[in-house]
Image (tube, coloured by chain):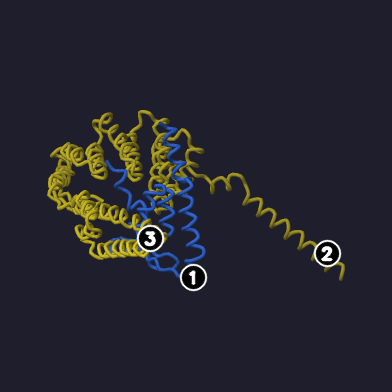
Amino acid sequence: MEEASRNKAIRERVGDQSILNMAFIKGIKFFQNVISPVDGDRCPMYPSCSEYGIQALKKHGPFLGFVMIADRLIHERDEMTYAPTVIVNGMRRYYDPVENNDFWLSEK
Amino acid sequence: MRGSFAYFIRLFIISSLFFSCSVLAEELKPETHNKALIIDETSQFNLAGQFFNEGDYFRAITEYKRFIYFFPESSLLEMVYFKIGEAYFKGKRWEDAIHAFERLREEFPEGKLTDRSYYLGGMVYFYKKDYSSSRKQFKKIIDSFTASELIDDAILQIAMSYVEEEKWLEALGSFRGIGKESNLYHFAENFASGLGEMDKLPLKSPALAGTLAAILPGSGHFYTGREKDGITAFSLNGAFIWGAVESYNNKNYAVAGILAFFELGWYFGNIYSAVNSTHKYNKRLKDGYIKSLKEKRGISLGINPVDKSYYLAFNFYF
């Protein structure tokens, strides 16, 4: 039991290491390092959509992670009505972490 | 003449040195020195308490530990161990607080502050959101300290831990365990009757939202009152389906495949998003309702068990 919880903690920290997941994460990092600096910072949320994507993929793997990224991009507009704001690097952001969007998966 | 002048100068210097040395020696006499530096257990305890009251909890802990070192036989020792735990608690050093309370119970197994240490230990776990461990601490007060004045508070905290876990029935049972003679009775009774109304909250169905989103992308969001998200979901799905179909019809199979791949993401993302929005909607509704119950003030008339005088109690949860 103790070993299982320890393994779970390690998995959560390291994240899903499958090839598909790593490929998705590399793709997002390419976006962060190459495209985003040119395209500009437009995500009003915190963590940013790309950072959220990496966190979701690490936590839930490639399939659910991919779906959660799509969810994040869809729910951005109305979430700004409900999410609390935080100041990040002097900019106002809407706080919307992964755990605010997967809390119900672990319930029941 | 010059020789006698030099003689007087020398004499003056020597006598000055002698005089200052004797003054210094007087100041450093052991009895004078000791008198200035005597710190008894009361003053050490008060010094630590002063830091504690000023909110300088970690300096207070140092002073309490100094107390233990210098006065290991003091009658205040149990209180000192307790205050260390309380200071860690107030400083939000949860693990240290738990260890301090355990240490207190090891040192004073039959101590007068054991119930209070269990209560604050329970609160530590409560703030850590470890509600099961929190209840264990509170139950120890109820089971082992039948005369403790903290029993009703422990029952109330058990009820609140069930509320945090959304275990309404268990919470109701605990609230109803608070006796009518308690100051907390009216608050608990109000909370319990409020919990009884939880079923009447207009919660939305995640399954229905998911089904609607699967049939027509975006409709699940409209169901939960997120019109902008609904329009976004509908537009994205519509655009990608249209693009994939057009590409296929124009024999651009690679483009059609890429668009179809992303469309799958949008489609399932739209369903997940609708279900997620419903859960968030329900959570907001429940949290708001529970917050309103916590903020409900209760005024009750009570009798002081010590001198039998009457008082008016004003209860609220924070």
Q: Which residue is mark 1?
A: A38
Residue toward you, A37 or B158? A37
Mark in the foreground, 2 or 1? 1
Residue at which label 3 appears: B256
State whether discs 2 and 3 lie on one chain: yes
Mark 1 vs mark 3: in front: 3
The image shows residue B41 at horizontal and vertical percentages of 45, 41
Chain B image colour: yellow
Specify the subunit that label 1 lies on. A
Specify the amino acid type for callout 3.
Ala
Callouts 2 and 3 close, C-beta under 8 Å: no
For the residues beneath circles 1 and 3, the answer to whether they share a chain is no
Secondary structure type for disc 1: helix
Chain (blue): A
The image quarter containing residue B247 is bottom left
Disc on res. B7: 2
In which quadrant of the rendered image does the N terminus of chain B lie? bottom right
Where disc 2 sits, the SS reads: helix
- Identify the residue at image location x=37%, y=58%: B262
Dot 1 and dot 3 residues touching (CB under 8 Å): no
